[in-house]
C-alpha cells in the first residue's frame, strides 16, 4: 500500500528557512540604505522603498503558494502549448550595440 503524504511533508523546510532569512535580510538592507534620521518613518510605511518591497515579498509568497498547491500534471498538460507558442513566434534579433547604443567618439 502506497502512502500519500501531504504537501507539508514534502517541502524542504531548511531551504524555505534559508529563503525567508535571505528575504528578511534583504528587506532590512533596503530599509537601511534609505534610512533618514530626520524623517521618522516605519519600515512598513508604503511611501518608502522598504514598504513597497514588502508588497512584492507578499506577492511572491502568494505566487509560491499557488505554484506549490497546483497539481504538477497541469504543467505537463500546458507545457506543449507554451512550447509551440514560443517556437512559432517570429524571431527577433537584437545586438548589444542596438540595445545599449555603444558609440565611438569621432574626431
Image: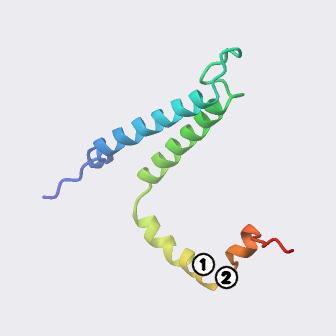
At x 50%, y 42%, the residue is: 61
Residue picked out by circle 1: 86
* Horizontal side of residue 45 vs 80, given as left or right: right
Query: Is residue 55 shown left or right of residue 4?
Result: right
Relative depth, front residue between 83 and 18: 18
Count residues near mark 1 (Cα–Cα under 10 Å), then give few for <14, some for 14-19, many for 20+: few
Report whether 92 appears left or right of 29: right
Q: Quadrant of residue 18?
A: top left
107 sits left or right of 70 in the view: right
Which quadrant of the view contains residue 22?
top left
Instruction: Work out which quarter of the rendered image holds the C terminus and state it.
Output: bottom right
Outermost right residue: 107
Using the image, determine if residue 54 lies above or below residue 40: below
- Residue 86 in percent (x, y) is at 60, 78
Residue 56 x/y as whole percent: 59, 41
The residue located at (42%, 50%) in the rendering is 69
* Residue 54: image location, x then y, percent: 58, 34
84 is higher (above) or lower (below) than 78: below
Q: Toward which corner of the image does residue 84 lie, by quadrant? A: bottom right
Which residue position holds label 2?
89
Q: Residue at x 65, y 16 (%)?
A: 37
Tell me which residue sits at (31%, 47%) in the image: 11
Structural crowding at the residue carrying mark 2, measured as other residues with C-alpha within 10 Å and reported as few (<14), some (14–19) or many (≥20)? few
The quadrant in which the N terminus is found is bottom left
Q: Tag 2's secondary structure?
A: loop
Amino acid at each position: 500500500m502506497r502512502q500519500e503524504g501531504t504537501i507539508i511533508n514534502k517541502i524542504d523546510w531548511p531551504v524555505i528557512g534559508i529563503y525567508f532569512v535571505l528575504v528578511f535580510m534583504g528587506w532590512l538592507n533596503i530599509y537601511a540604505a534609505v534610512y533618514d534620521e530626520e524623517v521618522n518613518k516605519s519600515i512598513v510605511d508604503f511611501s518608502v522603498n522598504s514598504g513597497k518591497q514588502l508588497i512584492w515579498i507578499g506577492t511572491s509568497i502568494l505566487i509560491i503558494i499557488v505554484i506549490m498547491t497546483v497539481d504538477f500534471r497541469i504543467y505537463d498538460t500546458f507545457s506543449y502549448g507554451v512550447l509551440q507558442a514560443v517556437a512559432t513566434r517570429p524571431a527577433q534579433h537584437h545586438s548589444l550595440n542596438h540595445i545599449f547604443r555603444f558609440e565611438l567618439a569621432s574626431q
